[in-house]
Amino acid sequence: MASQTQNKTQTHHLSRRTFLKWGGTAASALTLAPLIAACAPAPVAAPGAPAETAPAAETAGPRTGGELVIGSIQEPDSLNPWLTGLTVGLEVEALIYESLTRVAPEGNHVPTLAAEIPTLENGGVSEDLLTYTYRLRDDVTWHDGTPFTAADVVFT
């Protein structure tokens, strides 16, 4: 009887290539099914008495102040950017720490704590392209009013 079971499993051998092909097909189908369903046209309401249209509300522009609550599925393991091992930790740190530069939505670097982006033209990059010198903004202070210095950058 054991030999019959062994023979059945041997006759239905599935190669790695076939397994990956069918697995990829199944994964694609599971991924595309919700997308295709979302592309379906919205159901049309049955004709009836026309509803009164409310007057259009004025669109409000951006406002300052207030409170922003952002949900996360995980808690940061550390607020120290050098000690965190989680993406959520880096996301939270990006909201509470400033860096010398940041990447703008267009993809270029813009200064934040630095006065300018180092280039060859402004002398911030050495001729051999091995040394970058960042000039710091003069108007940056810590919460207690202490000036922000190069020693702070070295420390952090």
Image (cartoon, rainbow, N blue to C red):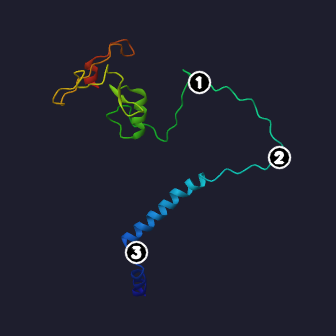
Q: CA distance from mark 1 to mark 3?
A: 61 Å
Residue highlighted by disc 1: 61
Quarter of the view holding residue 90: top left
Residue highlighted by disc 2: 48
Residue at the front extreme? 121
Quarter of the view holding residue 64: top right
In the rendered structure, which amino acid carries the disc numbered 3?
Answer: Leu
Of badges 1 and 3, the one in the foreground is 1
Quarter of the view holding residue 139: top left
**Residue placed most toward the observer, 84 or 70:** 70
| Residue at 37 percent of width and 25 percent of height | 98
Badge 1, how many Cα within 10 Å: few under 14, some, many 20+? few
In the rendered structure, which amino acid carries the disc numbered 2?
Answer: Gly
**Residue placed most toward the observer, 136 or 57:** 57
Of badges 2 and 3, the one in the foreground is 2
Q: Which mark is residue 138?
A: none
In the rendered structure, which amino acid carries the disc numbered 1?
Answer: Gly
Residue highlighted by disc 3: 14
Q: Along the horizontal axis of the image, is 59 left or right of 87?
A: right
Q: Position of residue 156 (x, y in %)?
A: 29, 26
